[in-house]
Image: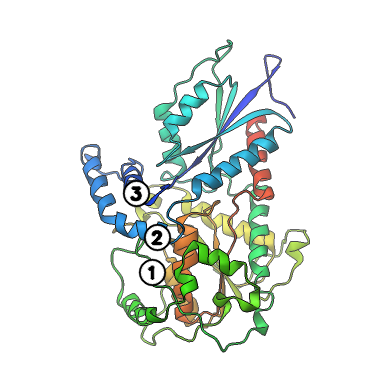
Amino acid sequence: MSVRCDGHVDSVGVVLFQLGGPDSLESVEPFLENLFSDPDIIDFPFARLARPALARLIASRRAKHARQHYASIGGRSPLRELTELQATALERELRKSIEARVFVAMRYWHPSTEEVVHEIHAQPLRSLVLLPLYPQYSKTTTGSSLNDWNRWYQPEAPRDGGDCPAVRVVRQFYDHPAYVNAVVERINQGLERFGSVNRRSAAATAPGPALEPFACHSDSERSEEEESLYSAQGKLREAASPAIRGGAGAVAAIDACPAGDRPDRQPATPRLPNDVDSPTAATLDGAESPATPQDTASSRLQPSTDVRLVFSAHGVPQSVIEAGDPYQEQVEATVRLVMGRGGWRNPYALCYQSRVGPGRWLEPSLRQTLVRLAREGAANVLVIPIAFVSDHVETLSEIGIEARALAYNLGIRRFEVMPALNDSPKFIQALAELVLGTLDGSA
């Protein structure tokens, strides 16, 4: 396929938008200040006047805990590196059919949208495709990135003459078949880790880490049930596993071990306190999936059905949803599509994570869901980050370290996290199809 304008092969620019993340512990606080300065995140009457001071205050108060979490994954966010790998792979795939250049724009860190706009204006581009890497649309993510683009981008005609580049936008892709297939492939890879789950010994234990649980993303208030849970968990920190305490490097080392020798594969003996009530179940919670499986060799695997699938999405305030944001609806649709395509018969649930500040947020939380599953006697859990396409602090620290520790302390025997899509060939193919379909009007 080629895209043509006035008889010439177009030079197409593709902009991948992402959240961004600090590249050092010293940059954590300014990164947070940028985040909380976003009018699509912090908005109330007269917010324009109060927002700068409020952003500095929130950033300074949250920086210590945030640094702890970034320290646990190597002292920086891997998001820029992973997004640049995606950009390189996408550009290579697109150049099989069109002349293309792929750029990366980070919403709250470098390279910023402003920096990328300057770079784009220096290129002889005929078309632009804006592709925020958020599968589900929300004003707080995709909307914020596109608003920032509109603040900085002023159309300019190519230096060699002709019209200004045509700008096309991919607003969401949660229901794109190639994206769904990419997620299914990753879930199957996660389920493969449970291949010997029913033959595991129940003798050993896997105590949790020394990190304060959910310190960066904790709710502003905890229920009495959660306080009871955290009191019990705190008593176990003295015996924390050095391997888990070591953060991302240690987790990588654990992943390299044979399954039978891995310390995070052993069941935990501590149980949920008897006085902890089960939180409300997820809105989307099923015992079996629809019977329309993906027809691939990997999908025909028959993993043990006692593995609970936990889909975890980034939370947003309930007020955002009540104002008409489609995020929750699209997340729920994503889960239905993935379960239908995968064809698994495993019980599954949807929850939300990364709550920041007071007010009502989407529920149930990841913490509440793990508590409920432990109460129900679940032994094996696979967490699926359904709203994240790349590994970053939410997947590596919040899920991979903290939620893992919480699960073991609750008595869940095996806890796995689905590998992020990152630059998987299926995901890159999905992105390429989105770009090409947007250019020819089929997407």
In which quadrant is the N terminus drawn? top right
Q: How many marks?
A: 3
Disc sitting over residue 26 in the figure: 3
Q: Viewed as shown, does residue 131 lie left or right of 149?
A: right
Q: Earlier in the sequence, mark 1 or mark 2?
A: 2
Q: Position of residue 85 (x, y in %)?
A: 59, 44
**In the rendered structure, which amino acid carries the disc numbered 1?**
Leu
Q: How is the image coloured?
A: rainbow
Disc sitting over residue 42 in the figure: none
Does residue 57 sit above or below 131 in this rendering? below
In the picture of the structure, the residue carrying the numbered disc 2 is: 69
In which quadrant is the C terminus drawn? top right
Separation (CA) of disc 3 from disc 1? 20 Å
Judged from the image, the secondary structure of the residue bearing numbered disc 2 is helix
Q: Earlier in the sequence, mark 2 or mark 3?
A: 3
Q: Position of residue 238 (x, y in %)?
A: 37, 80
